[in-house]
Structure formats: C-alpha cells, structure tokens
Amino acid sequence: MPNPEKNYAAIAIGIALVAILLIFLPGWIGMDGMDGGYALSFIAVWLAISAALIAWYFWGRAAQIERLLNGQELLAHWTYTPCEWQAYANAEQEEQIQENRILWYFMAGMCILMGTVFWLIDREAGLFVLLFMLALTGLLAIVAFGLPRLRRQRQAGKTGEAWLAPTAVLFDSVFYPVKSRMMWLDKVEFQDASGAAPACLRFYISHFVRSGIQNRILRVPVPSGHRDEALALVAQYNTDSPKPLRRRKS
C-alpha cells in the first residue's frame, strides 16, 4: 500500500529548499534591500520555516504509517471482499446523506429565515439578500448530498483495507492518529449488521480545528468471520493502555 504522507513531506521539503535559496537571492542578483530585497528575504524565511514544520509533521505521520504497514504494534489488518466493500460503501453513503440532511435542514431554515426577515424589512435591498440566501441554500445542498456520492464513486474503484493499531487507524487510505495531541479517541463501539449494512466498529474521535473541538464517527466494517476479533478490539481500545493482540491473517 502506498504511503502518501511521504510524498507530502517530500513536497514540503522541496518548498523549504527553494525558500532557502530565495533568502539569499537578493544578494546574488544585487537587488537593493529597500527596493524589495528585504521583503523578499523576509517572506522566504517565513516560507522556509513553515514548509520545514509541515515537512516535519508529515514525516512523522509517514513514519507512523510505515510502522503500521510493517506490522509493528498492529492489532489487526482487515481486507474485504468486493461484496463486503460494496455493502459498506452503500451503507456509508446512506448514513452520511442522512447525517448531512439533518444539518442541511437546519442551515437551510436559518438561511431562508434570515433572507425573509431582510426582505420584509426592505423589499428592494432585502430581495437581493433573500436571493443570495436561496442560492447559498442550493450550494449547501450540493455539498451535503453530492460529496457522499463522490466518495462512493471513489470507493467503487478500490479494494478496502483497514490497519488497526493501539494509537492509530489507517482506513480507506486515510490515516487517523487517534491518540495524538491534536486527535484523541473517546470510545469504540461494536455495531451489529442491520439490513444490507455490515457490522462495523464505530470510532468516536475528537480533534482540534480552528473553531474549537470537532467530533466525528469513523465506521470501519468488520469482515465476515471477524466478529470475535472485533469485540476483542473494542475492549482493547476502551482501556487506557491497550496492548497488541496476536495477529490473524485476513
């Protein structure tokens, strides 16, 4: 399995190196400092430091993924048959649309209410506000109901895998360091199969964003014949210091 975090780290390193060269460029070409040389060097220093920090961040993530792929401290490695993966992708799409529908109803109601109030106060200027709010409602609908379908299309052309470790989860090519400074695991639950939706592990994850703390649920399907292992994983994750289980071949 490829490790995309290495590519991100390499790109950031390349940007940092270019920025370091730009720091000294004004002196090399004889650019006067008061004519933009100092500004260029200052921006280049800021860019070099930022790129170096980003490279350090992604390189750490790449090292964690590499340990997972090498089987170090691995709790379980699950692969899925095409039928299992399709069932999960369909169920995940429906669940995401349902979750987004509730949020969209709330946001659409707020937009229409605000637009209507402005229109009632000022029929001329308020009309533009109302039309803008209606357009925003349509845009939110495209995002809320379109993104889950786009993700479903992306999942259709790949084979699903899950790498589960005590401090991280690598699933659907996305890395979740669930016990880091920026992200932490609240709890894990086992959800039985329901209709066409397969059984899954529900990871309740919290992480920092610019506006505060955001919560999300990561659903990892349980392959056929791995129910007992999944229940053991729930117990492992919900302890303070989980230890790796003996690996089973998928």
Image: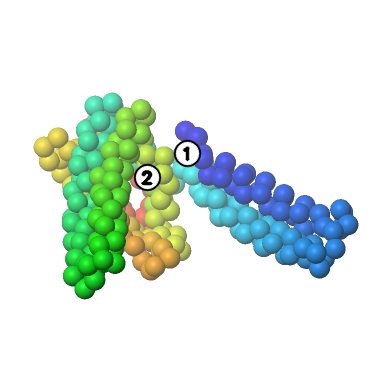
**Which residue, as the protein is rendered here, is positioned at the far front?**
124
Which numbered disc, 1 or 2, marks the residue that appears first in the sequence? 1
Q: With respect to residue 22, does 3 lie above or below? A: above
Residue density around tag 1, few if under 14, some if 14–19, many if 20 or more, within 10 Å: some
Most extreme residue toward the left is 195
Q: Secondary structure at mark 1?
A: helix
Residue under the point 12% across and 41% down: 194
Position of 5 with respect to 123 (left or right) is right
| In this picture, residue 204 sits left or right of residue 167 | left
Q: Position of residue 60 (x, y in %)?
A: 55, 52
Q: Residues within 10 Å of mark 2 (few under 14, many from 20)?
A: many
Residue under the point 24% across and 27% down: 83
Q: Amino acid at mark 2?
A: Leu
**Residue 4, visible in the rendered structure:** yes
Please, what secondary structure does the residue beneath circle 2 have?
A: strand
How far is mark 1 from mark 2, CA to CA?
Answer: 10 Å
Q: Which residue is mark 1?
A: 69
Name the spot of residue 3 as percent of width and height, x first. Answer: 51, 39
- Name the colouring of the figure: rainbow
Please tell me the numbered disc located at residue 203.
none
Residue 231 in view here: no
Number of numbered discs visible in the structure rendering? 2
Front one among 69 and 52: 52
Amino acid type, label 1: Leu
| Residue receiving disc 2 | 164
51 or 86: nearer the viewer? 51
Point out residue 159 in the picture as x, y percentages from the top left corner. 36, 29
Residue 250 vertical placement versus 143 (above, below): above
Q: Residue at x 14, y 35 (%)?
A: 196
Name which residue lies at 81% across and 68% down. Answer: 34
Please tell me in which quadrant of the rendered image residue 214 appears: bottom left
